[in-house]
Amino acid sequence: MAVPEKPAPVAAAEAAAMSESGAQTLTVSVGPQHSGSGHMRLIIELDGDIIVNVAPDPGYVHRGIEKICEVRNIIKSIPVIERPAIIDSSNLNHAYIKAIEELQGVEPPPRGKYLRSLLNEMNRIMSHLYWLSIYGVFVGHTTMFMWPLGDRELFIDLAEKLTGARITHSYIVPGGVRRDLPQGFAEEAVKRTLYFEKRLDEYEKIFFNNPLFSSRAKGVGVLPRREAIALGCTGPTLRGSGVDADLRKDEPYAAYPELDFDVPTRKEGDSFSRSIVRMDEMRESCKLIRQILKQIPAGPIRRRAPIVVPRGEAYSRVESARGECSFYMVGEGGDKPYRVRYITGSYRNMAAIPVLLKGGHMADMPTAWWSVDYWPVEADR
Amino acid sequence: MSGSPSREDMLIQNIREQFPGLVKEARVVRRSRPEIVVAPEKMLEVTLFLRDQLGFDHANGVSGVDYNREARFEVVYHTSSLEKKEMRDLVLAVKENLPRNTPKAVSLVPVWPGVENFERETFEMFGITFDGHPRLEKLFLTDNWDGPPPLRKEVRFPTD
Amino acid sequence: MSAQKTSQQEDDPLAMLADSISVWVGKLSDIVKRIVDTGPIRSVVNWGRIYSLWPVNITTACCSAEFGAASGARHDLERFGVLPLGSLRQSDLIVVEGTITKKMAKRLRMIYDQMAIPRYVIAMGDCAISGGLFHDSYSIVNGAHEFLPVDVYVPGCPPRPEALEQAIIMLQEKIRKSKVYAQG
């Protein structure tokens, strides 16, 4: 058994920085192992208790997915593409397949589009519930850890009935989707979403409108609107700072042009507003699931599509739970792409973390950091 | 193409009028996906115009592509607009071509601060340097990989 | 000590008495150790260790979602005594969930070395067993056993929460029968 050598210590120049007041600052390394979140290190410079500078150090879960996609057949890459944010897998899957279909010139049939949107909305709810439960770990609220995980199992059951897997769906394939709705699915899903909306009202009372949480999250980790736009932030992080950008409305895809929903936005830009945005999104997703199941047309679920990446370039993007997930694909014929550039919502939001932590207290760091829903595996790919 | 010019065509025409002779190639890949190819030394000028006059206020991403058979690297900046709602679905690709043996580009961090991490990743994955980048060092690959930049085509996988 | 005796001390009765006492004390500690390591006291010690396995979960990647689901309300790991409290020094189990990159492997070894004895390792997921889906990538270590002594392997990509519960029960059986790696 080869024991790996110890990593090099933080450079002395970083450690001996001076703050503006002339006092010597302290460099603290947060991570890479912490309870609940993935592995990422933040090198934080402290002046007493106030955070002066933050340098993110990602790469602890970097698996080289872009290179892997160049050597695997497009169908075999689907599980690999899903893995960065496995709790939100069908959205990433959707973006990848959209790029391939754009190059091939294939469009899925209407029933296939509705089924894609159905799984996407279910994944959005599952992902936000997981975020909320890990927020409970960070904030120290054990009920906030247990309840969302229990309610998440409701939707995992539905996903298992639909796709055969709990979280690794691999459901969206070139030309459509893999399986059709099983019998009894629609009634069961409607029942569960109605129950879950009542639970969301309880969550709002117990978790969010509760001074235990709101006094910790209001005014903490403020991201101003101008910075959010300039840094390229996306998803609920952007919508919590007053920009109502949502790809499902701005560049609609799949079944979204025919569905009716709102885009929740808040102006304040602090951790509390980002949390409320996510909760409102869960409500909208419940409404969307019921609409989809009512309006879904009959017909085939999949068109014939070859396992080939034709010559050309395509840029496709999808609104995943953490923001815009985009693929830039270059094809040269054959069944493997020439280049796959994969940018996820968390990777874009990584630029916002130094900005919203600066000037705050060290004790507020977990609240502010997790409200961005930075998922380290998704950023590292 | 029949009928009135699309907004993508008008956008490209606007850029061409502003920088005569600098925009080497331009085409509209499909609806909402125009692209222009710019000389590397003029990237800063063109992108400042895009941001200040045309409203492309953020970058969606930066990609490097290794065209080793043509002995060039290509760096593609994808940019879009958030403030202008009617342009939110348009993604403009701004490309530059660099010679493969000395790939030197100019950093666009002064234009779009969000590209800082993307340019760092392009540097470590391809070996392309960006002049003027505030912190050009490895982002994901420290302690992970010591060899040549891994996304270059000559670095092969064992299962390739 | 006997090797350092000089000719003066050879006939010293006090030194001879001290020597024989130390030999008998040594024999006594051997007997005590043998009683504790086998037999009823070891079973009691093992029984105490089994039902409070506090893990450090190395939430690397996707398997962490299933570990979270396993700790959640439906599959409750706490009924087995598994309570992830977070601090390394008060844990005795590492659950390596997911892909281990070379960068993380160095830190993971440091984490393992910091834990107090007894400590056990569960390798959860295909990536921790052999590299899994990413086995040919440039930044991956193909399996946790490359640098950690693994007690239980849980296959799956990711394993279901029920599989993780079975792994905990298997580890408890191993500890009960003292079939784990030598600690210390």
Image (cartoon, rainbow, N blue to C red):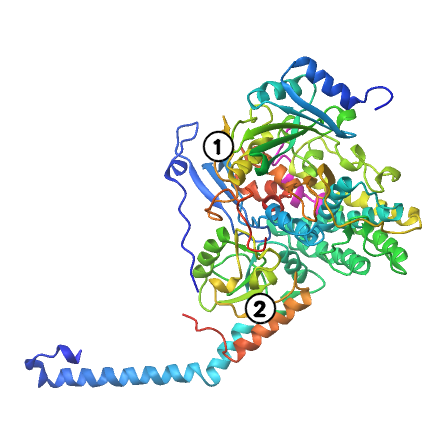
Label 2 secondary element:
strand
Residue A41 relative to residue A259: left or right:
left
Residue B77 location in percent, x, y?
63, 30
Above/below status of A181 relative to A326: below
In screen coordinates, is C181 left or right of A136?
Answer: left
- Amino acid on which disc 2 is placed: Tyr
The segment highlighted magenta reads: A207-225
Q: Residue A95 carries which label?
A: none
Left or right for A305, reference B146: right
Give the image location of residue A154, x and y in percent.
78, 58
SS label for mark 1: loop
Q: Name the residue under label 1.
A: B135
Say what amino acid the circle numbered 1 marks: Arg
The reply to whether discs 2 and 1 touch (Cβ–Cβ < 8 Å) is: no
Is residue A360 among what the camera can see? Answer: no
State which quarter of the image contains the N terminus of chain A.
bottom left
* A178 inside magenta stretch: no
- State the residue position of label 2: C153
Number of other residues with Cα within 10 Å of mark 2, as a class: few under 14, some 14 to 19, many 20 or more: many
Distance between the alpha carbons at the discs numbered 2 and 1: 42 Å
* Total marks placed: 2
Image side of residue C37 versus residue A38, left or right: left
Badge 1 density bin: few <14, some 14–19, many ≥20, Cα 10 Å: few
State which chain disc 1 sits on. Answer: B
- Quick check: C5 above or below A183? below
Residue drawn 45% across the image and 54% down it: C106
Where is residue C117 drawn, in percent x and y?
44, 67
Image coords of residue A304 (percent x, y):
83, 50
In the rendered image, which quarter is residue A240 located in? top right
